[in-house]
Amino acid sequence: MPIIKVILFALFLINPYLAFAEQNSHQNIVKQLHVPAGFTLSIFADNLPNARSLALGDNGVVFVGTGTEGAVYAVQDSNSDGVADQRYIIASGLTMPNGLAYKNDTLYVAEVNRIVRFDRISQQLANPPKPVVVYDQFPSEQHHGWKYLRFGPDNKLYTTVGAPCNICEPEKPIYSSLVRLNADGSGFEILARGIRSSVGFDWQPETDALFFNDNGRDYMGDDLPLDELNQWTTTGEHFGFPYCHGGDIADPDIAADKTCRQFTPPVWKFKAHVTPLGLRFYRGKQFPDEFKNQLFVAEHGSWNRSEPQGYRVVLVKFKQSKPVAEQVFIDGWLTKTGKVLGRPVDILEMPDGSLLISDDKRGVIYKVEHKGNHG
């Protein structure tokens, strides 16, 4: 017993130093990241293993979904100093609870095969309620099974169901689809198909048009196929998977008698294997006017490529409601020697116009602010 007590006491003494060392490590990473002139980057929250999708609650509470970690967190900057000082675990032991949506003091969480909700959550952060099942008819396959979740302008819940494979003809219509349903789980409908793996979408401020990413198939080489940004406009649209990639490349294994002309092409093409995930149109006033209504995209980074690429946040520039250019906004997570320092996942705009960016490799959330003059 005395030895155990000594060990426990030693761990108690060491723990603060470990926390300090981890925080110092995150700060060193921030110093290696590059942001445009006038912008600053800082650590908003850490100790969030596998942090992925983000959703904004009331009073500045930020909810954080995860993948394999199976947890949902909440963090809050209660003293408005730019750093979260409150951290809560809303749930654990869930099945890849990646997607989050918040409305009317209720947190909705998308697991692989279901959507659950946590009622009156802002009043119960420290002692969360048990989840209530909203909808549980999604497939249970974990391959591309994690979901993004958002409320649309019509107050319906939107999500996607990925393909259960790298490349295949899904057996059921639910696979590789964009879907929506009412907040109570009723009114389920499939809006579009041919979407391999989408883990990010947003509605354009000026038009309410829905833009979503799609990650291209693997094992077609370093530079094919290109990852996609798509625009959904009509129920029943088909965006090509598995027959056509990037709008003009027939699949070498499955195309069969299909042609790319049969499908809706992407409105923008990213580089191959950069893995675009979370995306947000900028609606705030803190950033310079040139960023207004432009699209930030988190590129999680490649794995199926001899030389990795992605690992950055880009800005897709729009003109007359259409994407026309792409430029790097933040990079440095991938070093010149090929070392991966972090992997950006999702982007969230805060009420003051700053941006939060999650990183599932480091388990942190970064904060991006603009300090210069802007109109």
Image: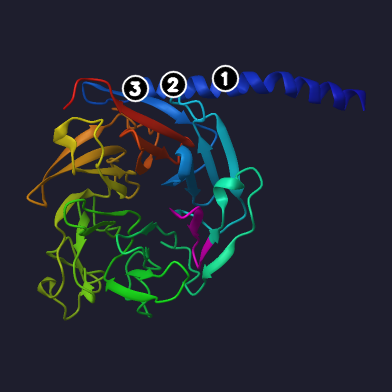
The residue sitting at 47% across, 26% down in the picture is 83
Q: Determine if the magenta segment contains residue 343.
A: no
**Badge 3 element:** loop
Please tell me whether residue 42 is drawn above or below residue 365 in the rendered image: above
The quadrant in which the N terminus is found is top right
Which residue lies under the disc numbered 2? 27
Q: How many marks?
A: 3
Q: Which residue is mark 1?
A: 20
Image quarter for residue 315?
top left
Q: Considering only vertical position in the picture, is 69 above or below 254?
A: above
What's the magenta region?
100-116
- Please tell me which residue lies in front, 182 or 322: 182
- Amino acid at dot 3: Gln
> What crowding class fits label 1: few (fewer than 14 Cα within 10 Å), some (14-19), or many (20 or more)?
few
Viewer-nearest residue: 340 or 101: 101
| In the image, farthest residue toward the left | 320
Looking at the image, residue 315 lies above or below residue 146: above
Label 2 SS:
helix
Q: Position of residue 141 (x, y in %)?
A: 48, 68
Name the residue that disc number 3 marks.
Answer: 32
Whether residue 12 can be seen here: yes
Q: Give the CA distance from mark 1 to mark 3.
A: 19 Å
Q: Taking 57 as reference, is 252 above or below it?
A: below
Going from N to C along the chain, the mark reached first, 1 or 3, is: 1
* Residue 272 locus on image (x, y percent): 22, 50
Residue 89 in the figure: left or right of residue 301: right
Query: Percent position (x, y) of residue 28?
Result: 42, 20
Amino acid type, callout 1: Phe
Amino acid at pointer 2: Gln
